[in-house]
Amino acid sequence: MRHILKNMSKRESSIAYATVLIVIVSALYVLILEPIAREWQALNFEMRSKAVTLKKDLAILAERKALESDYSKFSKYVKSEKNEEETAAEILSYLEDLSRSDSCLILNIKPVGTKDHGKYKEIMVDLSSEGSLSQFTKFLYDIENTKSAILKVRHFVLTSKAGQEGALRGSFIISKIIIE
């Protein structure tokens, strides 16, 4: 190698050294630096995604006490030591009392059945009644905003009663969720 460099002029040997240096630096870059940079970027991306997940988890954890408080407050209304028939009877009785206080006339009321959703059950009640729009408005409001029964109106249809102005006939599906 020295023999080849001795036969070259100073300019040619400088170019040869520069070429060898460029090849060595390029090889170092491709074989060492670029893989390290890619790994660094991948780790950086993973770290950022874990930081976002951690922030979300910390926000949920911060809400834990509030959620536990709400759960303990409402669980007494949805946990039931009674069987489904007794709970359905309570719902029917509650709806009858509510309709009397809101001046809605119940035509028919019956339990439709129970849907099992795994961790909880939903007891459904079918109710048909008559009344005015203001009576139905109060009745629906009282059903949805009761604190002692936690009922939900799943479906309702209001139709005008033939021959009577202002009189409506309502058909409702009302449900209650219970946790065993």
Image (tube, grey):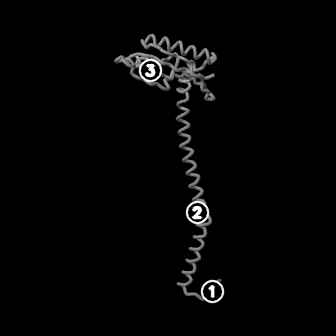
Residue 91 is situated, as x and y percent measured from the top left of the image, at 54, 16
Q: Specify the amino acid type for callout 2.
A: Glu
Q: Nearer the viewer, residue 45 or 112?
A: 112
Residue at 41 percent of width and 23 percent of height = 159
Query: Which of the 4 image quadrants contains residue 142?
Result: top left
Which residue is most to the left?
165
Q: Nearer the viewer, residue 19 or 162?
A: 162
Mark-to-mark CA distance, 2 and 1: 33 Å
Mark 3 is surrounded, within 10 Å at the Cα level, by few (under 14), some (14 to 19) or many (20 or more) other residues, namely many
Labelled disc at residue 34: 2
Q: Earlier in the sequence, mark 2 or mark 1?
A: 1
Which residue is most to the bottom?
7
Q: Specify the amino acid type for callout 1.
A: Ile
Residue at 49 percent of width and 11 percent of height = 97
Mark 2 is surrounded, within 10 Å at the Cα level, by few (under 14), some (14 to 19) or many (20 or more) other residues, namely few
Residue at 56 percent of width and 32 percent of height = 61
Q: Specify the amino acid type for callout 3.
A: Gly
Q: Earlier in the sequence, mark 3 or mark 2?
A: 2
Query: Which of the 4 image quadrants contains residue 78?
Result: top right
Which residue is most to the front?
163
Mark-to-mark CA distance, 1 and 3: 105 Å
Secondary element type, mark 1 = helix
Mark-to-mark CA distance, 3 and 2: 73 Å
Nearest to the eye among marks 3 and 2: give it. 3
Labelled disc at residue 170: 3
Secondary element type, mark 2 = helix
Quarter in which the N terminus is drawn: bottom right
Query: Which of the 4 image quadrants contains residue 10?
Result: bottom right
Residue 116 is situated, as x and y percent measured from the top left of the image, at 62, 27
In the picture of the structure, the residue carrying the numbered disc 1 is 4
Q: Is residue 121 left or right of residue 163?
A: right
